[in-house]
Amino acid sequence: MLIRAILNKVRKILYIGLGLICLVLGIIGYVMPGMPGTIWLIIAATLFIRSSDRLYLLVVNNRFFGPQVKEFLETGVMPLKAKTISIASIWVFSLISVVLAPYNWIFKLAILFLAVSGTTYILTRPTKGNPNH
């Protein structure tokens, strides 16, 4: 019983710590061009929902990015612009890595697999404003 309580406390601290790192990355992504912000905020909120109601509410009630994060967590809906930018970023940076990285074909194949996986995930999310979602 005591071990379980200790493990739960450690897990909660770990989730809060990782969530805070993601929150900082998300905020940086909102002000730094070329760095994604929303995905880090979604990850932060997901970690906070498992560890801290106060921090979760801080993210989803934020006037700048809260509604978008909350909508994605509740419905999985993504705006078309976010989908387009995400997929374009995935492929631009993946292709740069494949072409310029001095690694072998296994590394390059892994990069392409992750790019296809990310693209597939994004394309399977409902699009905001689409009546079919």
Image: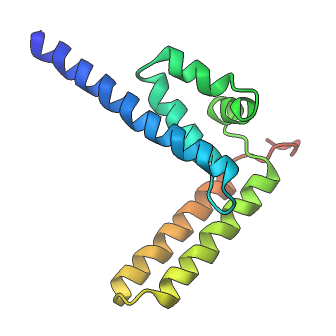
Q: Is residue 49 above or below residue 40?
A: above
Given residues 105 and 27, the one toward you in this image is 27
The spot of residue 13 in percent (x, y) is 31, 25
Given residues 118 and 70, the one toward you in this image is 70
Quarter placement of the C terminus? top right
The residue at 81%/53% (across/down) is 80
The residue at 52%/15% (across/down) is 54
Q: Is residue 122 above or below residue 126?
A: below
The residue at 53%/46% (across/down) is 25
Quarter placement of the N terminus? top left
Q: Is residue 53 above or below residue 106?
A: above
The spot of residue 12 in percent (x, y) is 32, 23
The spot of residue 73 in percent (x, y) is 62, 32
Report which quarter residue 7 is drawn in: top left
Q: Residue furthest top?
A: 1
Relative to 62, 49 lies left or right: left
Given residues 73 and 19, the one toward you in this image is 19
